[in-house]
Amino acid sequence: MKSKILLIGIDGVNLDTALLHAPTLAALKEKGFFTPITIEPPTWSGPSWSTLLTGSTHEQHGVTDNSFTGHKLLHHPDLLSRAFYQDQSTTTFAAAGWPPLVDPIGHGPVIHERREQAKGLRHRVLVRDGETY
């Protein structure tokens, strides 16, 4: 049986406060693997999510603010793309409420579109407005 991974990221939320008011999230934390992270400044959404999802530093991926100007994300694959390239039978899915993470028409996206895998039902992306890629 293949391993399954669920990564939940909630931007701008204090974890202790969230766990007090979200019992399902608290249960997932207790039953799964949890580790706190520290992101180097600037800690804006664009640079932070790019670092988390690519494993690259701000200097490497080039995202220094939320405009994504001058980014080098194409050269730093996201974790879903890396999983697929490691094992071509891997199926990946990303859902995001902030379009720059997944929308191929936007500033990023941080999560690569991978059209060929989407056609083969190996990769799906859902953005807040309900569009899928």
Image (cartoon, rainbow, N blue to C red):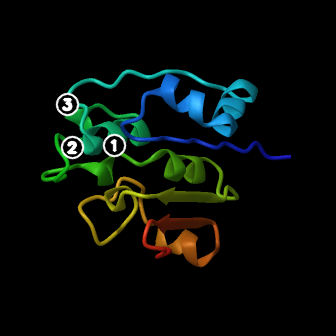
User: Which residue is found at the position 66% from the left and 30% from the top?
Assistant: 26
**Are the residues at dot 3 and dot 1 in contact (C-beta closer than 8 Å)?**
no
* Residue farthest to the right, as pictured: 1
Assess disc 3: are there few (<14), some (14-19) or many (≥20) residues with their C-alpha within 10 Å of its C-alpha.
few
Viewer-nearest residue: 22 or 102: 22
Residue farthest to the left, as pictured: 69
The residue sitting at 36% across, 66% down in the picture is 103
Q: Can you give x and y, in whole percent of width and height, for residue 89 in the image?
A: 70, 58
Picture residue at 72% right of the left edge, 31% below the top: 27
- In the picture, the disc for residue 50 is 1
> Is residue 85 or residue 105 the one in the foreground?
105
Q: Please say if the residues under marks 2 and 1 sit with CB atoms less than 8 Å apart.
A: yes
Circle nearer the N terminus (2, 3): 3
**Would residue 46 appear left or right of 117 to someone viewing this image?**
left
Determine whether 56 is above or below 5 in the image. Answer: above
Residue that badge 2 annotates:
63
Q: Where residue 18 sits in the image (x, y, percent)?
A: 52, 32
